[in-house]
Amino acid sequence: MFYLLLTILANVAIFMSFRSFSRFDIKTLPAIVVNYGVCVITGTLYVGSPEVISSFDPVSPWFISASMLGLIFISTFFLMAHTTQVRGVSVATVASKMSLAIPVIFSLFIFKYAVNTLDGWNYLGIVLSFIAIALVSRKANKEGASPITFRFLLLPMAVFLLGGLIDTSLNYVNHHFIDEEIEPVFPIFIFLAAFALGLIICLIKKVKFGPKEFLGGLYLGVPNYFSIYFQLKALSAFENNGAIVYPALNIGIIIGSTLLAILLFREKLSKLNYIGVALALVVIFLLSYQEILKAL
């Protein structure tokens, strides 16, 4: 539970960082690229450069996985940014959060990690998590409902699939290729690959980097590194049971970011949003009550 809580806090910090970008007029693309560079520096300072260098193994499965995930990370970001611009924040948010269905399905029916530890209350919590996320993410559409066509669904479906692919891959790689020694090093190479690709894109597009983008990337990059590191630790603590970790993680992020958005950004919630938050609290209890009872 400790590492799951730290993962939630790190992701809430990421959400708050993104929210500040619009308030302080920080350009998202260059800030994101700077953020990936800061992630690499943060991880290297945390682990120590000798350990990072000695762990470097370009033919190992974990290193290849990290490089591929880095490319997926930045590709997912571009898709999320584009989806937000053309389909709206709510559509992008729901698509990214609902992507937890993919790692949950893989964990339960394909990987079957620690499935024998789940009971009926846990399964109920998994089902209710989707309802809670939909309720909390629902925002009023002042421009009217858009027609649901294949073209409309294409972008959010891509976000859904890539987001699920990232979490499923982390779950699989953590179980098969990563040990305790590699856990803090693995995210460094994910973000190094993302930084390299992002920098190339910025150079091709001739994107300009200003002081605000460097500052935004700095305070985004530190929690971003630890969000992946703590996620790997949380998966290990729960025996790589993604069916428990990912619903609890997403629900925790939504509760934390929603409460802070109310306090810091004066966001207003609808009745459905409040029902979703209340249901999310029930979901967290259903998913983690065994751990809570152990602690007592």
Image (tube, rainbow, N blue to C red):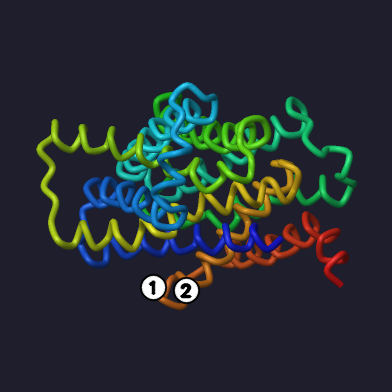
Callout 2: few (<14), some (14-19), or many (20+) C-alpha neighbours within 10 Å? few
Identify the mark at residue 115; answer none if there is no mark: none
Q: Quadrant of residue 197?
A: top left
Q: Do the residues labelled 1 and 2 touch (CB within 8 Å)?
A: yes
Q: Which residue is drawn at 47% across and 53% down?
A: 47
Q: Is residue 178 left or right of residue 70?
A: right
Report the front residue among 231 and 108. 231
Residue 250: give x, y in percent of width and height.
60, 52
Q: In this view, does 4 lie above or below 108?
A: below
- Label 2, secondary structure: give it: helix
Cα separation between marks 1 and 2: 6 Å
In the displayed image of the protein, which residue is found farthest to the bottom? 263
Callout 1: few (<14), some (14-19), or many (20+) C-alpha neighbours within 10 Å? some
Quadrant in the picture for the N terminus:
bottom right
Report the front residue among 179 and 129. 179
Residue located beneath label 2 in the image: 262
Q: Is residue 157 above or below residue 257?
A: above
Q: Residue at x 50, y 43 (%)?
A: 96
Q: Is residue 242 left or right of residue 225?
A: right
- Label 1, secondary structure: give it: helix
Residue located beneath label 1 in the image: 265
Please tell me how many numbered marks the rendered image carries.
2
Q: Residue at x 41, y 47 (%)?
A: 50
Residue 115: give x, y in percent of width and height.
83, 38
Q: Which residue is drawn at 62% across and 31% down?
A: 177
Three-letter code for the amino acid on which mark 2 is drawn: Ile
Residue 168: give x, y in percent of width and height.
60, 33
Report the front residue among 76 and 172. 172
